[in-house]
Image (cartoon, rainbow, N blue to C red):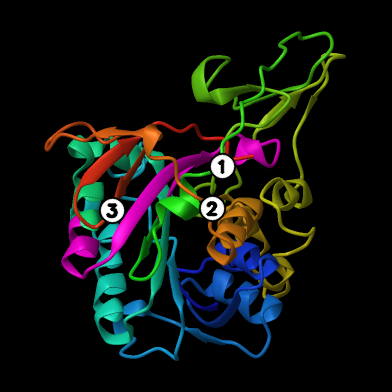
Amino acid sequence: MRVAGLFAGIGGLESGLARAGHEAEIFCEVWRPAALVLADRFPGRDVLPDVREVTSLPAHDLMTAGFPCQDLSQAGRTLGLAGAKSSLVDHVFRLMDVAHPAHVLLENVSFMLRLDGGSAMARLTDAFEARGYRWAYRTVDTLAFLPQRRRRVFLVASRTIDPADVLLVDEAEPPTPTTALDTHAHGFYWTEGVRGLGWGPDCVPTLKNGSSVGIPSPPAILMPDAAIVTPALADAERLQGFPEDWTRAAGEAGLERLRWSLVGNAVSVPVAAWIGERLATPGSFDPARERDLAEGARWPDAARFDGTRRRAVAIGAFPV
């Protein structure tokens, strides 16, 4: 498929899709450090600077958008799609009305399903349905692919295929981690202690984007010998599925301090590759997984719209 990447960041979605044979035709990314990385890693592709000023796109089959999460994140402003940043997703729908892509792929934080009763997801799905698209979404954990715990919501909408055959067919049992301080490494954040999302046996917690002024916020790793180590930037790039030094262009432009933010904001490449493989070769959704999704009910971790009704889907966060 031909891909148009909006809010492309450093190309995590598009890099993964390329591994499955889907090639980006154009990018849109307003943050200069990220745009420099795109220009370096995808030579010959246009990188448009501001989605608000885009009026047309080249022919494409799949529109992608890892739209801003600042207003949807538990650690952010929690203004939802009314916020100045996350409301930019409206431009996805504006450009859909111009370009009429067959398929759309969105990515954002899983907290959007909880914030304000899931009003953001309700607004997104309403917009897709109004345009005649079927949709499916699923919460996926990067830990299924890489040693990083990172839960994100991926939504596929389509006019031509059933998105449930893309997102809701593969499932694997999550690993049962063995936690023993004298035999296993454990990732953690100093600010979050040893409970909840800040502690991970044999993995690191979710990589963060650092501070607003570019101060890195890497996790720490407690080794079995009680040594504490900090992942380097190259480690962070690999923990997101990128080759080492993927963000070199930002450093070469004198923006070294922002490279950690670039990586922390990115979409994990192998998750996008899995989605790309299923877009190329859809599976067969098992309707036994679905149940009624009552109007006004809490949004589940996975759901679908089959063109007639919305249904919750029982499927875990580990596709492989």
Which residue is drawn at the image coordinates 82% and 14% (left, top)?
226
Q: How far is disc 1 from disc 3 in space, using C-alphas?
A: 18 Å
Query: Which label belongs to residue 283?
Result: 2
Residue at the disc numbered 1: 170
* In this view, the mark in front (1 or 2): 2
Residue 224 image-quadrant placement = top right
Which residue type does callout 1 highlight?
Asp
SS of the residue under disc 2: loop
What's the mark number on residue 306?
Answer: 3
Residue 34 or residue 134, whichever sits in front: 134
Q: Position of residue 42 (x, y in %)?
A: 66, 80
Relative to 169, say whether 50 is above or below: below
- Say which quadrant the N terminus sits in: bottom right
Q: Is residue 239 above or below residue 171?
A: below
**Location of residue 153 in the rendering, given as x and y in whole percent from the top left corner:** 42, 46
* Magenta stretch in the rendered image: 126-155
- Image side of residue 268 versus residue 222, left or right: left
At x 28%, y 73%, the residue is 91
- Counting from the top left corner in percent of width and height, residue 129 is at 20, 61
Amino acid on which the number 2 mark rests in the picture: Gly
Q: Residue at x 54, y 49 (%)?
A: 209
Q: Is residue 21 above or below residue 113?
A: below
